[in-house]
Image (cartoon, helix red, strand yellow):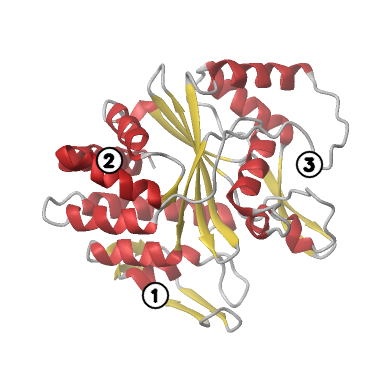
Amino acid sequence: MKKYLKYLVIFLGVFGAILGGGIFAINRYYNATSFEEFEAIYQEQEIEEVEEIETAEEKEQRELDERYGKTRRVNILLVGIDGVRTDTLMVLSYDQEDNMLDIISIPRDTYIDLYGYRDPARKKINSVYGYPEGRGGIKGTAEAVSKILGVTIHNYAVVDYKGVREIVDSIGGVEVDIPFRMVYDDPYDTPPLKIRFEKGKKLLDGEDAVKYLRWRKNNSGAAGGEGDLGRISRQQEFVMVAMKKAMNPIRLPNVISTGLQNTKTSLTLTEALYYGTKALNMNDTDINAYSLPGEDRLENGAWYFEHDREKTRALMRNLYRGIRPVEDEGN
């Protein structure tokens, strides 16, 4: 994960150098890719306005966030979408003062009951994006993530499967070492999803890359790789290889163009380049990755990932205090 982030920030730095004199024209196009007006979100309590007593620890966390929110620490929500659902959720929490980056991954099946929906599928965080009546979208998703982590979400970046396919094809595919045989079919997907991968090294084109990143279990029900948490790890490794391959002077301009056309974000180009430039000075010890603390549980016939509220709050408090690396106690 640390290597992946290193390649990511190098990518952004080279991106800025290449753009140089054309930054104003590119910035105009870049801003046109953004969607939905977005302001920093801090979800302090249940959306249904359920009265909750704020604990001393929660008050301390809120005050830390208010103090450092936009002057010291910036939290960017990274979202991979699949239709009306989110398939990947990660928060990049950047400490501007110490120039350190913490990544918190949130499993797509994380339990969250926002509006009292009876449908069990509505109680998973990946469904929030598709909530009706203006409750969903990127704002609703940011509110849900803010509520779980207890911190402000300042910005977002979104990419869909089409974007992933085109970006991977623009770099000539990505080679991965498939850890085990993957066999899965979803005839109800549009178009029907069919995954067939044998164990071993394979060069994935854009279409196969999406299948690899989407795989969660085999038709037999065997997860093989620790379920959603294993999937998160494989996704991180995949992106690391992809970013490394993109660092080719001949290939890079096309990768940049493709990325701009397939990513939507609330960040301006100036902000993205600023963070990328700052991150160029990071070393491996400045970057740490975590998964949301918690465990799987079965409720009314549906499986959820239930985050541990106390451990999550402790994780975020320690990160804000500059205590790194923080042991991931939840997994």
Between the C-alphas of marks 3 and 2, the distance is 37 Å
Q: Nearer the viewer, residue 214 or 11?
A: 11
Q: Secondary structure at mark 1?
A: loop
Tell me where residue 16 appears, x and y as whole percent. 22, 38
Name the element at disc 2: helix
Q: Residues within 10 Å of mark 2 (few under 14, many from 20)?
A: many
Tell me which amino acid carries mark 2. Answer: Leu
Q: Tell me the quadrant of the picture where the C terminus can be found.
A: top right
> With respect to residue 199, does 3 lie above or below?
above
On the rendered structure, is 80 left or right of 280? Answer: right
| Residue in the image at 31% along x and 63% along y | 168
Q: Mark 2 touching mark 1, by CB under 8 A?
A: no
Q: Mark 3 is on which residue type?
A: Ile
* Closer mark to the observer between disc 2 and disc 1: 2
Q: Is residue 294 visible?
A: yes
Instruction: Please report the residue visible at 73 percent of the width from the left and 57 percent of the height from the top.
Output: 133
Q: Is the residue 52 above or below the residue 173 in the image?
A: above
Check disc 1: other Cα within 10 Å, few if <14, some if 14-19, many if 20+. few
Q: Is residue 309 left or right of residue 255?
A: right
User: Residue 7's image quarter?
Assistant: top left
Could you say which is closer to the camera, residue 106 or residue 254?
Answer: 254
The residue carrying mark 2 is 12
- For marks 3 and 1 on the same chain, the one whose residue lies earlier in the sequence: 3
Give the label, 3 or 2, closer to the camera.
Answer: 3
Q: Identify the residue under disc 3.
A: 47
- Mark 1 belongs to which amino acid? Glu
Rendered view: 204 above or below 329: below
How far is disc 3 from disc 1 in space, using C-alphas?
A: 45 Å
Q: Position of residue 129 (x, y in %)?
A: 63, 56
Residue marked by disc 1: 198
**Looking at the image, which is closer to me, 102 or 128?**
128
> Which of 217 and 104 lies nearest the eye of the viewer?
104
